[in-house]
């Protein structure tokens, strides 16, 4: 009886220890779950949070600088046609006053380039609206060249392939055309940012 009582007391004494160990394990599991839950919540917060998008209207609201023009003395040149001449007034639109100051320094070089362009034209080439627009581009090219900007003019449209044309040759021409278009876009973008951005005719008389 004494032995049985002793064993019973031993078992009773062990019960709290076992219960205490189980309780500790439960507490640890709960803590881990809480930590994981917190981490998951943080991850959800960062993943689901909408990224901050810059205000699209901020750029539009930014004040635009007033246009800057440089007026050149009128040009009177003999055209490539015998007995025909052109009298034209030109203003150059530039990016900013800094570029305008550079243009003023380079007026002789710019005028020389423009004169070479004008004197090489025939009256019929520059009589139409399309001809005048092309002339504006060529004058812009000459003005930007003086500023150190090599402006590549857009190529003329490709004609329709002739019947029976070699497909390989047609493809080569198209690839060359696309290459010139991309080069023109890049150079025009540079001129828009650093040089002469437009040419305006203030008078245009062919006689």
Image (tube, helix red, strand yellow):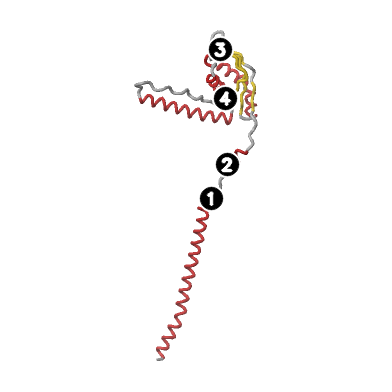
On screen, residue 31 versus residue 65, left or right, reads: left
- Tell which circle, 4 or 1, labels the residue nearer the N-terminal end: 1
Q: Which mark is residue 121?
A: none
Mark 2 or mark 4: which is in front? 2
What is the CA distance from the residue labelled 1 to the residue labelled 3? Answer: 64 Å
On screen, residue 168 versus residue 27, left or right, reads: left
Q: Secondary structure at mark 2?
A: helix
For label 4, the residue is: 144
Q: Residue at x 48, y 73 (%)?
A: 23
| Quadrant of the rendering where the N terminus is positioned | bottom left
Quarter of image, res 78? top right
Q: Residue at x 48, y 72 (%)?
A: 24
Pick the front one: 135 or 36: 135
For label 3, the residue is: 79
Q: Secondary structure at mark 3?
A: loop
Asked if 159 appears above or below 30 in the picture, the reply is above
What is the CA distance from the residue labelled 4 to the residue labelled 3? Answer: 23 Å
For label 2, the residue is: 56
């Amino acid at each position: 009886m004494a032995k049985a009582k002793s064993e019973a007391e031993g078992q009773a004494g062990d019960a709290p220890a076992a219960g205490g160990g189980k309780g500790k394990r439960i507490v640890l599991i709960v803590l881990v779950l809480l930590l994981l839950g917190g981490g998951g919540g943080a991850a959800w917060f960062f993943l689901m949070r909408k990224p901050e998008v810059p205000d699209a209207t901020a750029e539009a609201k930014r004040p635009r600088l007033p246009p800057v023009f440089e007026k050149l003395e009128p040009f009177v040149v003999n055209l490539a046609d015998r007995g025909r001449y052109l009298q034209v007034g030109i203003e150059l639109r530039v990016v900013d006053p800094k570029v305008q100051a550079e243009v003023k320094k380079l007026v002789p070089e710019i005028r020389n380039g423009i004169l070479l362009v004008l004197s090489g034209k025939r009256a019929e080439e520059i009589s139409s609206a399309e001809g005048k627009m092309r002339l504006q581009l060529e004058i812009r090219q000459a003005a930007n060249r003086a500023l150190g900007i090599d402006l590549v003019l857009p190529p003329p449209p490709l004609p329709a392939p002739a019947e029976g044309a070699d497909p390989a040759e047609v493809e080569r021409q198209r690839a060359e055309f696309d290459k010139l278009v991309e080069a023109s876009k890049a150079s025009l973008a540079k001129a828009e940012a650093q040089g002469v951005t437009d040419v305006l005719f203030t008078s245009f008389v062919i006689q």
